[in-house]
Structure formats: structure tokens, C-alpha cells
Amino acid sequence: MNAPLDARVDLGRWLVAQRDALAGFVRKRAGRLLLRLETAEDLAQGICAHLLERGARPHDGEEAAQRAWLYTASERWLSDRRDHWSALKPARPDSSAVGTPGSSVERFAVVSASGRILPPWTWGRVVGIGLMATCTCPAATSAIAGAQPL
């Protein structure tokens, strides 16, 4: 269910007024890993966009209760973002967590081309074999088409 337009405008203005406090809250609560992946300002903007899209409204009442509502919604958003990033590929390669200790230098070996797999442009190709037309007319005068005389 969408909130009426005037309620969204009021919520938008209220969120703009809370922007600095929300960004500070996000910096404190997001954690280092999440803040390496997204800035506090981007996270705060995502929270505001999410609340506006849902048509959510803080409870009428004191400013402290309204901020508590905002911070609760922000905690949920931050939790969703952590889940999002943790579902993706891990930040470090698997080879750094397994294997023989001290052999990680092998990962940094010089990359060189392999002769086993050739890119398509190195495959040999047939270059222009002309058409050899033959004809058999009367049996006594067969001919093969050749080059034009000089």
C-alpha cells in the first residue's frame, strides 16, 4: 500500500533533516567490512530510498521515538546489505586459506601463454583456392579452363 503523496513529501523532508544523524549512525553500526564495500553516505541514501519506496512513516510523537523508528529500519537495511555482500564471492581467494603454508608465492608466478590452446586467429586457414572448371564437350575436344593469356 502506498502512502499519499503529501505523506511522502513530509517523510522526504524529515529524512533530509535527519541525514547527518543517519550517516553518523551508519558509520558507527555498519562495521568495517561493509564500509569497505559501500560508503556511509550511499548506505544512508539506500535507507532513505527504501523507506520512501515502501511509503513507511515514523510514529507520530516525540522526536526520540521517530529517530528510534529510523534507526530500527536502518539496522534492518544494514543487515540486508551485509547478507547481500556475504552471499557474493568471498573477499579473499580460496588459495590463501588452504594449501601448504608458505607456498602462496606460487600464485604470483608470471603468466605466460600456453601452446596447448590456441586462439582462433592462430589456426591455419586455407587461402583462396580458385575454381577449376572442367567441361567435356565433344569427346575429341575436351578443355580445362586456365589462366588468361598474357
Image (cartoon, rainbow, N blue to C red):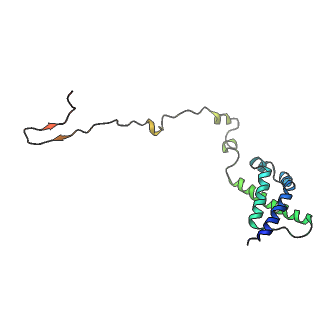
**Location of residue 147 in the rendering, given as x and y in whole percent from the top left corner:** 22, 32
Front-lying residue, 147 or 95: 147
Furthest-top residue in view?
150
Residue shown at the point (77%, 71%) measured from the top left: 4
Front-lying residue, 101 or 147: 147
Q: Quadrant of residue 15?
A: bottom right
**Location of residue 71 in the rendering, given as x and y in whole percent from the top left corner:** 85, 61
**Location of residue 53 in the rendering, given as x and y in whole percent from the top left corner:** 74, 64
Q: Quadrant of the N terminus?
A: bottom right
Residue shown at the point (39%, 36%) measured from the top left: 124
The total of numbered circles placed on residues is: 0
- The answer to whether residue 1 is above or below residue 25 is below
Furthest-bottom residue in view?
1
- The answer to whether residue 124 is above or below residue 55 is above
Q: Quadrant of the C terminus?
A: top left
Tell me if residue 103 can be seen: no
Residue shown at the point (14%, 37%) measured from the top left: 143
Front-lying residue, 49 or 106: 49
Residue shown at the point (53%, 33%) measured from the top left: 113
**Location of residue 52 in the rendering, given as x and y in whole percent from the top left corner:** 76, 64
Tell me if residue 81 can be seen: yes
